[in-house]
Image (spheres, helix red, strand yellow):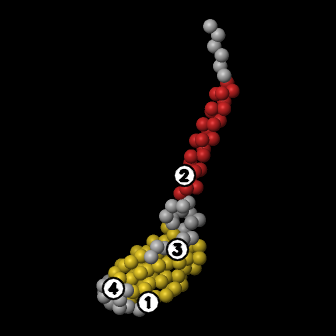
Amino acid sequence: MKITHNRKKSFVAAVGGAVAAAAVPAFLFAAAGTAQAGTTIDTTTDALGVSVNITSVGNWGAQSSGWCQYTAHPEGPGVPVDQLPFYLQVGGTHKLWFPGIQTGTKWNVFVHCENGLDSKTTQVYY
């Protein structure tokens, strides 16, 4: 009985498997670029006013950064804030503070930056 090995098929299968194995992480990395990126807005209130932390989040290169503008509009009593400029570093946090008394008013808060993605409009109560 004679056994014949087909080395050409084995070589092609090995190369194809290696290419597929390399392509999967590359695809996952490329797809991750479309994941959530931009900014997060975190607010806290106390007896003296409102503190706002704006953080650059997401994948490197897709994070919001550079000159940004903070906008907050009340749906009731309150003085609106329109396009307050500030500078946000990639992966950094910028803190804003506004004096005031809590009234329970709903505010629509939005951040736009020259680089990266804009924030979603966030509704907060002060």
SS state under label 3: loop
Amino acid found under the numbered disc labelled 3: Asp
First along the sequence among labels 4 and 2:
2
Query: Mark 3 — residue?
Result: 118
Classify 58 as above or below 79.
above
First along the sequence among labels 3 and 4:
4
Query: Mark 2 — residue?
Result: 28
Label 4 and label 2: CA atoms lie apart by 43 Å
Residue 83 placement (x, y as % from top left): 52, 85
Label 3 and label 1: CA atoms lie apart by 19 Å
Query: Mark 4 — residue?
Result: 105
Q: Where, by quadrant of the figure, is residue 16 drawn? A: top right
Q: Where, by quadrant of the figure, is residue 14 drawn? A: top right
Label 3 and label 2: CA atoms lie apart by 24 Å
SS state under label 1: loop
Amino acid found under the numbered disc labelled 4: Thr
Classify 33 as above or below 97.
above
Classify 24 as above or below 116.
above
Q: Where, by quadrant of the figure, is residue 116 drawn? A: bottom right
Query: Mark 1 — residue?
Result: 80
First along the sequence among labels 1 and 2:
2
Kindly check if marks 1 and 4 are in contact, taking CB atoms under 8 A apart as contact: no
Amino acid found under the numbered disc labelled 1: Pro
Residue 53 placement (x, y as % from top left): 43, 77
